[in-house]
Image (spheres, grey):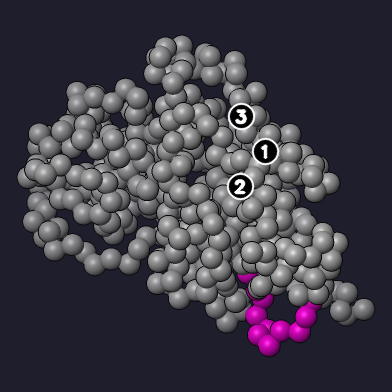
Amino acid sequence: MMSQVEALGPSRRLAHLRRSRTAPMHDARERLLFFAEDMTLAHVGRLLSLAKSLDAARYQIVFACGPHYRRFVDAAGYTVLPIATLDGAWLNHCVRTATPLFSRDYLRRAVREDLAAICAFAPDLVVGDFRLSLGISTELAQVPYAALVNGYWSPHSTTPMTVPDHPVSRWFGPAVGQVIFDLVRDRALNAGCGPVNALRREYGLIPHASLQEFYSHGTYTLYPDLPALAPTHDLPSNHRYIGPLLWEPELETPASWAGLQSDRPTLYLSLGSSGDSRLLPTLIGALGTMPLQVILATAGAEMPESMPENIIAAPLVPGSQAAARADLVVSNGGSGTLYQALAAGTPVLAIPSNPDQHLCTRAAVDAGVACCLRSDQLTVARVQEQVRMMLSNPTPRFRAQGFRESIRTLQPGSALSCLVDEIRRPVCREAAC
C-alpha cells in the first residue's frame, strides 16, 4: 500500500515535503534525521556515537534504520522510523561473488521510504551512513544532507586499492590478481554506479562520474577518520574530517576476565559483524596452541563444541576494554575496530576480505600501526608467525600509542554542530531582513 506521500505526483509530493518542513513546530530544537543502512553494526554504531556527542537540549534526533540492529537504537532511547535495508548476509554474498550491492529497483524503493521518513519528521538536516539512496531523495526533497563515509572512499583519496578476496585473487594469487585488478578496476567500480545513475536520470538528476562520487555524494561529506589513516588531497570546502566515531554496546565486564593473567600476552580477536566467520576455525586453531590468552568476540558466529582453554569467547564483549587489555588486536581490518584499538594504543593484525576492509588496512599498514594477512591466504602457520612477529616488535605499539591522544581529544559532535550553524545561518539572515 502506498503512503500518503508516495500517492502524490512528483511536483505535489515535493510541495508537500516543503510545507512539512516549514510548518510551525512545538519543539524549537533543530531536527536531525539519521539514516543507517544497517547491513553492518558499524553503520548504526557510528550514528549512535555521533548522536550521543550532541547536545540534547539543542537537537531533536530521530533514527531511520532497519530491523537488524534496531535494538541498539531503541536501547539508546531514540525514536525510530522503520525502513527496509539490506543485511550482512547479502553484503558477504556480494563480496564473494562480485555482485553489485544495489539494484535499481531496490534504490527506487529506498528513495520512496526515505521521502516518507523525511516527510514524517521534517528535518533541518539528514545524516546518512551508507544509505546511498539519500543522494537522490534529499535532492528531491531539497533537504541538506551530510553523507558519512570513510575517507578512503573519497574521490580525493590517496590510498591505493588492493585486490580484495575475489575469484581473480583466488584463481591467480594476489600478485597476478593485483595486476588484473588494476587493469579493470575503474571500469568494474564505475559499473556499480549503473543502477543509481539510471535512477538519477529518471528523476532528472545529474549522474555520478565514479563509484567514489556515488558513495560520498551529499550536500556535505563527513569523514569519521584521522587524516593520517584516510589521507586525501584537494578537498572541497564541503568535505570535512570529523574524527573517529567510537561506539560499543553497554556491557558489563565479563566475570571470566578475572582469570586473565598479567604475565601472559593477551590478544583481542573480533571479526565484527562484517567479517568472514569461516575464518574463525583457522584463527582458533592457530591461537589455541600458542602461549598466550585470547578474548574472542564471536559476533554470533557458530563456535566449535570444544574451545581451547586459553580462549575466552562471548558473542559480544566491551571492545574498548578488551583492546586496552590486549597486547594485540586481531580484526577484519575495518575502521571500527581499528580506531577502537588505536584509542587504546594497541596495534592491529588485520585480516581483510572485502574492499572496504582492504582500503582501511592499507592505510593502517602505511601508518605503521597494523600488519596484514589476506583472508584468502590464511593458514595456521601464517597466523602464528605474524602474531609472534608483532608481539616481539615494539614499533607498531609505539606508533599506535601516538594516535591514542589525538583520537581522545577530537569532538565529532562539535564538528557537526558547526555544520548545522552553517546551514541555519542563511535562514537567520533572511529572517533578519
Nearest to N terminus: mark 3 or mark 2: 2
Above or below residue 335? Residue 372 is: above
Q: Residue at x 55, y 27 (%)?
A: 160
Mark 2 crowdedness (10 Å alpha carbons): few <14, some 14-19, many ≥20: some
Between 341 and 114, the one nearer to me in the picture: 114
Residue bearing the label numbered 2:
106
- Quadrant in the picture for residue 349: top left
Alpha carbon of mark 3 to alpha carbon of mark 1: how far? Answer: 12 Å
Q: Which mark is residue 189?
A: 3
Residue 114: give x, y in percent of width and height: 65, 60
Q: Residue at x 80, y 71 (%)?
A: 16
Residue 66: give x, y in percent of width and height: 50, 59
Q: Residue at x 43, y 46 (%)?
A: 88
Nearest to N terminus: mark 3 or mark 1: 3
Is residue 305 in view? yes
Mark 3 crowdedness (10 Å alpha carbons): few <14, some 14-19, many ≥20: some
User: In the structure shown, which secondary structural element does the residue marked by tag 2 occupy?
Assistant: helix
Residue 194: give x, y in percent of width and height: 68, 34
User: In the structure shown, which secondary structural element does the residue marked by tag 1 occupy?
Assistant: helix
Q: Residue at x 19, y 26 (%)?
A: 380
Disc 3 + disc 2, Cβ < 8 Å: no
Left or right, residue 384 beside residue 175: left
Residue bearing the label numbered 1:
195
Query: Which residue range is magenta in the image?
Result: 22-32
Between 369 and 117, the one nearer to me in the picture: 117
User: In the structure shown, which secondary structural element does the residue marked by tag 3 occupy?
Assistant: helix
